[in-house]
Amino acid sequence: MDVSAPQRPAAETVFATPAVVKSRPQKWLAVPVGACIALAIHFLVPKREPVASTHYYPLLLSVMLGLGLLGAILYPFFEGLRKWMRDMCPILGVATMTAGVWELVTSCLGLLPLPYFPGPEGVFGSMVSDYKLLFDSTWHSLILLTSGYLIGVMIALVTGVVIGWFPHARYWGMPLLKIVGPIPATAWIPLAMVIAPSALLSAIGLIALAVWFPVTMLTASGINNTRASYLDVARTLGARQTYLIFRVAIPGALPNIFIGLFMGLGTSFLTLVVAENVGVKSGLGWYVSWAQGWAEYGKVYGALIIMAGFFSSIMTVLFKVRDRVLVWQKGVIKW
């Protein structure tokens, strides 16, 4: 048998590896390059549309450029920084270049009409000038979302465990889920405004209802699909029903429960924005509607940017909680 044949590709791979490594693009360059391109567009390309100069947008680009260069200097010395820059620099660089393209299309070339499509300088200027109202709206949205979400999750976990574990509860509860659950929570707004004593409580109830259905359904599914072998072993060792529910069924259903929590979080975001437009006089959804009514589209886009960061931050926190709780399934979960 000729053993040299299978060894040749390995040798070629070994010798080719340094060249491949050297040819890889330096990802940390994405942020400085993107910031330079955006600054060049801002200062060198003539503006067709009149824009109130606020200097906040170029200041932000300059900060991004400075941080990118500082990270490039510190890159060889800190392993944690290297890992973070390898993961985040391409995204931040593309986002920075997108801001430059945004200004090119709107303020410079005028391809999108004002006032519906303001440039980044107008949007960031509106955000800074109206920061007090934006902060107040964000704070009220956080309180409203957190209250409704936590109430909905607590009720859904109880109903999901009961429906998933007890056959009689499943017999009566599943038809209710199939009838009430698919109806969007926003469809209940007229009834909620009549029943609830205030607009705030009606909004909290609508968010809780939006969270209740997916969390209940997936919790019940996870409890009902607990492996019979786990339950049999626990019963053989003398476990009672309480132990089987809280120490066997619920831990086994946690992956399903977290899927329901993520789905409920998405529906709660949608319900929050709609509920704030009906009766509630604060919050990011209300702010967007108010700014649109005055044709302040710079404020509208600024609120949408804050809304995206606000929602993605909450989603990231929930991912961290999932990773901590399901640490025993590390490497198995792929979402």
Image (cartoon, rainbow, N blue to C red):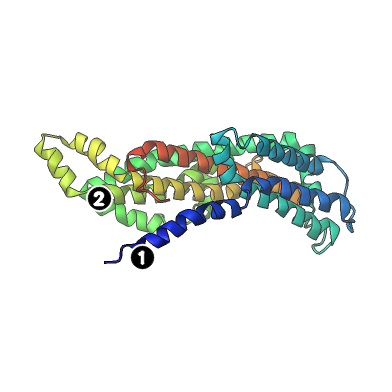
Whole-percent x and y of residue 121? 81, 47
Q: Residue at x 78, y 40 (%)?
A: 62
The N terminus lies in quadrant: bottom left
Does residue 241 lie above or below 48 as drawn?
A: above
Decide if residue 6 is on the left or right side of residue 315.
left
Decide if residue 103 is on the left or right side of residue 311.
right
**Toward which corner of the image does residue 65 lie, by quadrant?**
top right
Q: Can residue 44 be seen in this view?
A: yes
Q: Is residue 290 visible?
A: no
Q: Residue at x 62, y 43 (%)?
A: 309
**Toward which corner of the image does residue 306 lie, by quadrant?**
top right
Whole-percent x and y of residue 71? 66, 37
Whole-percent x and y of residue 172? 27, 52
Q: Identify the disc placed on residue 19.
A: none
Q: Which of 150/306 is in front?
A: 306
Q: Which of 47/234 is in front?
A: 47
The residue at which mark 1 appears reads as 5
Whole-percent x and y of residue 204? 52, 41
Q: Earlier in the sequence, mark 1 or mark 2?
A: 1
Amino acid type at image mark 1? Ala
Q: Nearer the viewer, mark 1 or mark 2?
A: 1
**Mark 1 Cα shell of 10 Å, populated few (<14), some (14-19), many (≥20):** few
> Quick one: SS at disc 2?
helix
Q: Which residue is drawn at 36% across and 54% down?
A: 177
Q: Which of 67/250 is in front?
A: 67
Amino acid type at image mark 2? Asn
The residue at which mark 2 appears reads as 224
